[in-house]
Image (spheres, rainbow, N blue to C red):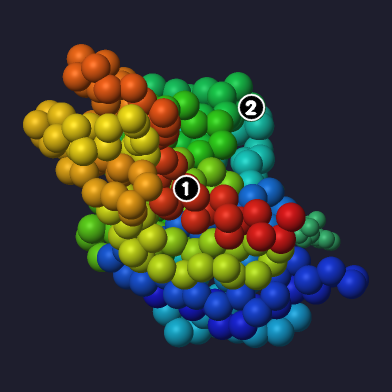
Amino acid sequence: MIEAKGLTKRYGRTDAARDVTFTAAPGRVTGFLGLNGSGKTTTLRMLLGLSRPTAGQALINGKPYRELKHPLRQVGAVLEQGLMHPGQTGRGHLRTQSLLCGVGRQRGEELLEYVGLADAAGQRTGDYSLGMRQRLAVATALLGEPSILVLDEPANGLDPSGMAWLRGLLRAHADAGGTVLISSHLLSELELLIDDVVIIAGGQVRLVAPLAAVAGDEAGRLRVRGRDPHALWQVFEQAGARVSTDGHVLFVEGLAAEDAGEIALHAGIAIHELTAEQPSLERTFLELAGAAE
Ligand SMILES: Nc1ncnc2c1ncn2[C@@H]1O[C@H](COP(=O)(O)OP(=O)(O)OP(=O)(O)O)[C@@H](O)[C@H]1O
């Protein structure tokens, strides 16, 4: 369990984070979303004891990070890149980190396999691609078998298959009862993964909610206006779509825009408007994340 309680960090006259309050719960993946410069890294650094809050409290399993007995066994973090020596091999890096963590060598070997770096274990990390360094950072975070994982923009440098791999790994971690807090400036990166969403803008939390509550059920809806709304309604329903209206516009669910256009053409009904609405979560994110702009 991670708790941010009124976390505030002031740099000079700016509040990089102001009264940030949210919880990341066990068994769930919490997405921490905000545009660049919104205060995500500042908040995560306070949660991980890397920076002292100006006000408020950051608790990991009920305690400030610095008071945890075996912090690396409770929290694994993937922060900025480059915390590995470029001359060290991937295997060497994990061996050094295992010592710090107090775990045996074998754990590092298992993790090299688990993150898909077994074949590259003998290469210098300086020769690793960005994606390989991210995989090694994830392996490092997992060394102490922590129940809590905190990842700051881990998608940077990962290609789509790398991102799919990471999603699988984090989902499995949460499903096994772990807590995952992951930040991103792109909703699309997290949408398929997260259970809860926290949106931050201008250093302030704008939304804390289960994803399902925000995503709504109107995702993928079409707005349609045409010369004969009743006839349109009928042909769309005959094609298996669900149709509703606010009196002016037909809202059509279950059809792609192309199909709706073709169906109307075949029925000989002139279309005046045909728009695919943005899924509501994307809309909410853009509205809230841009609030401080
Ligand atoms: N050490 C610092 N000294 C002064 N200002 C800082 C410091 N660290 C962060 N800031 C400022 O605080 C604000 C929030 O920065 P932060 O890095 O937390 O944002 P972020 O959401 O992580 O952004 P990004 O996605 O770009 O990493 C920014 O305006 C930044 O310039």
Amino acid type of the residue tagged 2 in the rendering = Gly
Instruction: Tell me the residue at 34%/31% (across/down).
Output: 226
Q: CA distance from mark 2 to mark 1?
A: 37 Å
Q: Is residue 101 visible?
A: no
> Which disc is residue 246 wearing?
none
Name of the residue lying farthest toward the right? 12
Foreground: 186 or 228? 228
Q: x and y percent of residue 99 in the render?
A: 50, 55
- Mark 2 is surrounded, within 10 Å at the Cα level, by few (under 14), some (14 to 19) or many (20 or more) other residues, namely some
Quarter containing the C terminus? bottom right
Q: Is residue 174 visible?
A: yes
Name the N-terminal-most of marks 2 and 1: 2
Ligand 1 image position (quadrant): bottom right
Quarter containing the N terminus? bottom left
Quarter-wise, where is residue 121 in the image?
A: top left
Instruction: Tell me the residue at 36%/35% (across/down).
Output: 225
> Which disc is residue 282 wearing?
1
Q: Secondary structure at mark 2?
A: helix
From what the image shows, is residue 103 above or below residue 208? above
From what the image shows, is residue 131 above or below residue 15? above
> Which disc is residue 126 wearing?
2
From what the image shows, is residue 117 above or below residue 209? above
Instruction: Tell me the residue at 33%/52% (across/down).
Output: 247
